[in-house]
């Protein structure tokens, strides 16, 4: 004999809502951020009246192994964390450090002048100062009363 399942309209509606949420999330989740490689680079991005400032955490990498580029309105940070020699005749109990190349691209909030950018690297923190293009800087207009 077959088992009968009681129809529950609330359960059906909840399932339909979950499916619609998934469809909308897939459609609208075109992120301005993209990742490649072994992991992500944690970043902070802020802007002042004159500059866009980006701080990126890239521990375990040497400054010469970083490649920073600005193409249009995208900033890309690429690098490679080189593997140390594996110890022979050893059994790993924990292995979480990831080695290899990585890249992270972010959408800049405005146009910048890449030729005048400054980059500093200290203790695994990269700081980029990207000057804003003149046309994107705020302009003040003085109002004269008659």
Image (tube, helix red, strand yellow):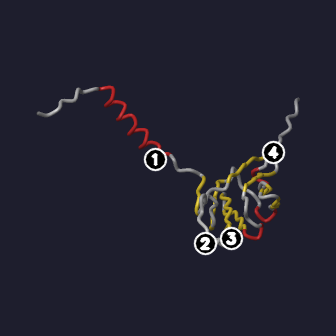
Judge left or right: residue 25 versus residue 43. Answer: left
Report the residue marked by disc 2.
89
Mark 4 nearby-residue class (10 Å; few <14, some 14–19, many ≥20)? few
Label whose residue precedes the other's in the sequence (1 or 3):
1
Local secondary structure at mark 2: loop
- Mark 4 vs mark 2, CA separation in Å: 66 Å
Q: Nearer the viewer, residue 134 or 60?
A: 60
Report the residue marked by disc 1.
26
Contact? badges 2 and 1 (CB < 8 Å): no
Q: Nearer the viewer, mark 4 or mark 2?
A: 2
Q: Nearer the viewer, residue 84 or 118?
A: 84
Q: Nearer the viewer, residue 52 or 137?
A: 52
Question: In which quadrant of the rendered image does the C terminus lie?
Answer: top right
Report the residue marked by disc 3.
84
Contact? badges 1 and 4 (CB < 8 Å): no
Mark 3 nearby-residue class (10 Å; few <14, some 14–19, many ≥20)? few
The image quarter in which residue 84 lies: bottom right
Judge left or right: residue 19 versus residue 118. Answer: left
- Mark 1 vs mark 3, CA separation in Å: 39 Å
Q: Nearer the viewer, residue 28 or 146?
A: 28
Q: Position of residue 118 (x, y in %)?
A: 82, 61
Local secondary structure at mark 4: loop
Considering only vertical position in the picture, is 60 above or below 136?
below
Report the residue marked by disc 4.
139
Contact? badges 4 and 2 (CB < 8 Å): no
């Amino acid at each position: 004999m077959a088992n009968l399942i009681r129809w529950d309209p609330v359960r059906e509606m909840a399932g339909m809502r979950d499916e619609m949420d998934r469809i909308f999330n897939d459609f609208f989740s075109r992120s301005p951020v993209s990742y490649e490689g072994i992991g992500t680079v944690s970043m902070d991005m802020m802007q002042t009246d004159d500059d866009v400032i980006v701080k990126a955490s890239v521990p375990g990498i040497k400054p010469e192994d970083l490649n920073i580029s600005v193409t249009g309105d995208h900033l890309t940070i690429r690098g490679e964390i080189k593997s140390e020699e594996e110890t022979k005749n050893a059994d790993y109990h924990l292995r979480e450090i990831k080695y290899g190349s990585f890249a992270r691209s972010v959408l800049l909030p405005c146009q910048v002048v890449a030729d005048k950018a400054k980059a500093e690297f200290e203790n695994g923190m990269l700081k980029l100062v990207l000057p804003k293009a003149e046309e994107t800087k705020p302009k003040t207009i003085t109002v004269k009363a008659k």
